[in-house]
Amino acid sequence: MKIKITLIIFTLLYIVQLKAQEETIRRDTLKEIIITSNRISLPFSENSRTITLITSEDIIKSAASNVADLLQNIAGLDIRRRGVDGMQSDLYIRGGNFDQTLVLIDGVKMDDPQTGHHSMNAILSLDNIERIEVIKGPAARVYGQNAFTGAINIVTKKIKENNLKVNLGYGSYQNIKGGITFTQKFDNGGIFTALNYQESEGYRYNTDFKNKSIFVKANLGSYNLTSSYTERDFGANGFYASPAAIDQYEETQTSLVAIDANYTIKNITIKPRVYWKRNQDLYLYLRHDPPVYRNLHISNKIGAETNAVLNSSLGKTGIGLDVSRVFLVSNNLQDHARTVITGFLEHRFEINNFDITPGIAISSYSDFNTKAFPGIDVGYRFSERLKMYSNIGYTYRVPTFTDLYYIGSNEIGNPDLKPESALSEELGFKYNTRNLDINVAFFNRTADDLIDWAKDNPEDPDEKWEARNFSEVTTKGFEIDFGYRFQLWDLEQRFNLGYSFIEDENKDEYTRYALNSIKHQLTSGIDFKFSKLFSQNISYRFVERSRGETYTVVDAKIKTELPNRIGVFLSANNIFNTTYTETNLVPMPKGNIMLGINYKIY
């Protein structure tokens, strides 16, 4: 009933605003934004995959204060959070799990060999982000094995001008946050630096946290440096193990250093990169009595990759090689290492209205077999506005070291696990005009040896969760994304609506993560202005999971730009105090607000 009422309200508002439209909106569309790829990069409109763009404009208008909350409003994405401000979050795409999704920062892969729980650890402040590219569906042949169900690429802001900006915020639960960004351009490059700090007393017992981060980006001629450091210390009441474990505590430290270059020689572009990523994870079962149970994991990943694109009369040919070595030192998992060598090859043909991009990635693992991920993207353009696309591809993921070796009071790993694999297919349609964007996609994924944590008897408190392979799991569904821009009172307004449906094959065993997908997900939002001084955003999200849980959450934000380069905003999350959980029965915060101000010094 709540869904029907909300849809009626939005539809009526939409009709009224359509009648009020008096002129064509003169604005740049998203179609020419180049979607980042380490090899063949294409404008948004020419891609034959399901890709959602979150622009800097979207970020500014959103009621979200962090990346995890922002991604919640994308159909097909499931961000399972534990606490306020995305303190600990897991990323799922189209019914996959957190180990099957890849996060990248400026094209650098942020996967962790210990566990996918750390994928979101190094997420940047929204002030540092130019756009976020959400690639749904199989992406292993483009990015490698962890892009099993999709990938999220965070593109940081370009160094365009000299700038010094300060922002402060204060909200519910004594949530204090502040940051400073500095940008300086030089004759042949520039530097961008951001410092951020946040702390909160928490929204319930033992959910306090402190976050510190620094991000540095520098350009000099053809060379680029990307580096970041993030430290998170937080009370983890019920976050892991049993919800009754209220005294858990965790500290994570994540750092990244990457240096890349870009050379163009006639019709060949070569992009080499070296990178180092480190993650440290300290977990205490009893915060105030560490010796009872303490885990310390330190992982390091060192890698080098070279990618090249050749432009010829036959189209674009992309070739790449990525070599990485990961090391894990752990008092629980013991010490392990893994070498991964991946080669990429793809070519894009354009024949009349068709575009065809076959490709393959071949990965060799020091502790598992060599595996190939072939795939192909096909698109047909009926007109400049309407395009049909389809893709099919194999994906593959080797178990994390947690999957294989973890031993805890409630969980036990399985050293006999096999890698999981899947065949994924997708068919979609895109319709884009200056004011209207519509995307419809149907997808199917058949996974073999899927890895998840399971119990034979979920009611038995003495039985441990065990990592297991499932013989076959089929996931199918569809998504609809609708976006409309119009003018009212000579001011630009926007309305967005998204819906996704996912159905997993039923399993007899009770699983902890993957097979509790969002079955029905409805997201909608409207950005509206009544005057040039103020802008408002309201977002609505309805979720029904495959096990029957349902909830509805509404967020809102109002912001204004004052004279003298001052901006002020007030955001409110869960304004109707919905009671709900997203993972491990951790109750999410009730209604909470944040008041913020930013000042651009120059």
Image (spheres, rainbow, N blue to C red):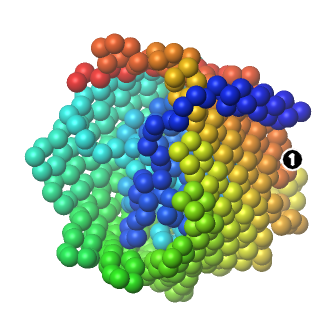
Residue 143 relative to residue 487: left or right: left
Q: Nearer the viewer, residue 150 or 316?
A: 316
Residue 56 position in % (x across, y down):
44, 39
- Examine the rendered structure and indicate whether residue 583 appears above or below residue 430: above
Check disc 1 and give the amino acid type: Gly
Residue 336 relative to residue 394: left or right: left
Question: Looking at this rendering, what residue extends furthest in the front direction?
Answer: 22
Quadrant holding the N terminus? top right
Residue 15 position in % (x across, y down):
73, 31
Residue 437 position in % (x across, y down):
60, 48
Residue 314 position in % (x across, y down):
39, 84
Q: Nearer the viewer, residue 283 or 5?
A: 5
Residue located 12% across and 43% down the image: 186
Residue located 47% across and 32% down the image: 60
- Examine the rendered structure and indicate whether residue 4 appears above or below residue 402: above
Which residue bears the numbered disc 1? 548
Q: Nearer the viewer, residue 392 or 34?
A: 34
Tell me the quarter of the picture where residue 338 sits.
bottom left
Residue located 40% across and 65% down the image: 41
